[in-house]
Image: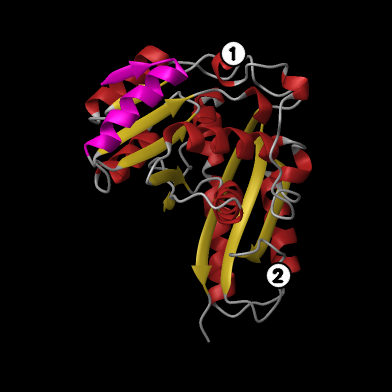
Amino acid sequence: MLNLTRKRELRAELAAIRRDGRSIALVPTMGNLHAGHIELVNQARARADFIVCTIFVNPLQFGAGEDLDAYPRTLAEDIAKLEAASCDCLFAPAVEEIYDTDLAVATRIHVPDLSDEYCGRSRPGHFDGVATIVSKLFNLVRPDLAVFGLKDYQQFLIIQKLVTDLEFDIELLGVEIQREASGLAMSSRNRYLSATQRVQAALIQQTLQSMRKQLEAGARDFRAIETAAKDRLSAAGFDVDYLSISAATTLRRAEPGERQLVILTAARLGPTRLLDNIRFALHD
């Protein structure tokens, strides 16, 4: 596996791949890789000739008081996992290589509407950081395919709109959430959880599935279902940021009559912020 840290090296290697007529897939990550990340690589491998995984803890995604400095960095372990998954190239640049200017005056990309609610409301500027780094990586790698996990479903829709609006000629693939045996969505931040908290955290997925069953059984008071679910999580020790039954394509709060739904949530357990969602269609 190639292990690159410089943009010029990356561009030179990928130019040779394109000259050979080989397709390129991009798997962007912030490292601390787990089985969910490796599934992204596997899905990319099934669809493209040459796989580029990036590891970059993007400072523009972190607000004041968030865990930028503490975010787990496990590069040696990550390299071993990528090699075992037959990844072709790792690009792991320093911050100065990606942002060669003062971050306070660096250009940012904003995707309106979709970026403004849920995680966008509680983490101002977060999705601007996501849109900016994803655009930079798209321009650096120029992939045929880009692969993202669907744990952060809001992020995936934002990137989808970014690709459409800015005319990136890139196919996007969203990969289903990989889960621990308990149902907890795999996340790099799960390592912050104690053993007891890991067991407790499984209640998030159980709660979402309970909401889904109510809706599939014919319940249509969406706001009452949301409130009861929030109360359940709060009583179990979670600090719920949001929990919403929303339209799957727009993320607007769903109303009776909406068929394509997503239930998405963010909740803190101790200092750890956990995301999860489920998507499904209602049938008459």
Q: Quadrant of residue 120?
A: top right
Q: Is residue 60 left or right of residue 54?
A: right
- Left or right side of 54 for 72: right
Horizontal and vertical percent position of residue 24: 32, 40
Q: Residues within 10 Å of mark 1 (few under 14, many from 20)?
A: few
Amino acid type, callout 1: Glu
Query: Residue 11 colored magenta?
Result: yes
- Secondary structure category for the residue under label 2: helix
**Viewer-proximal residue, 52 or 281?**
52
Residue at 68% in and 40% down = 109
Q: Quadrant of the N terminus?
A: top left
Q: Nearer the viewer, mark 2 or mark 1?
A: 1
Q: Which residue is mark 1?
A: 96
Please state which of residues 71 and 83 is positioned toward the viewer in this rendering: 83
Q: Which residues are magenta?
A: 1-20
Residue tagged 2: 222
Disc on the earlier residue, 2 or 1: 1
Q: Residue furthest bottom?
A: 284
- Res. 209 in view: yes
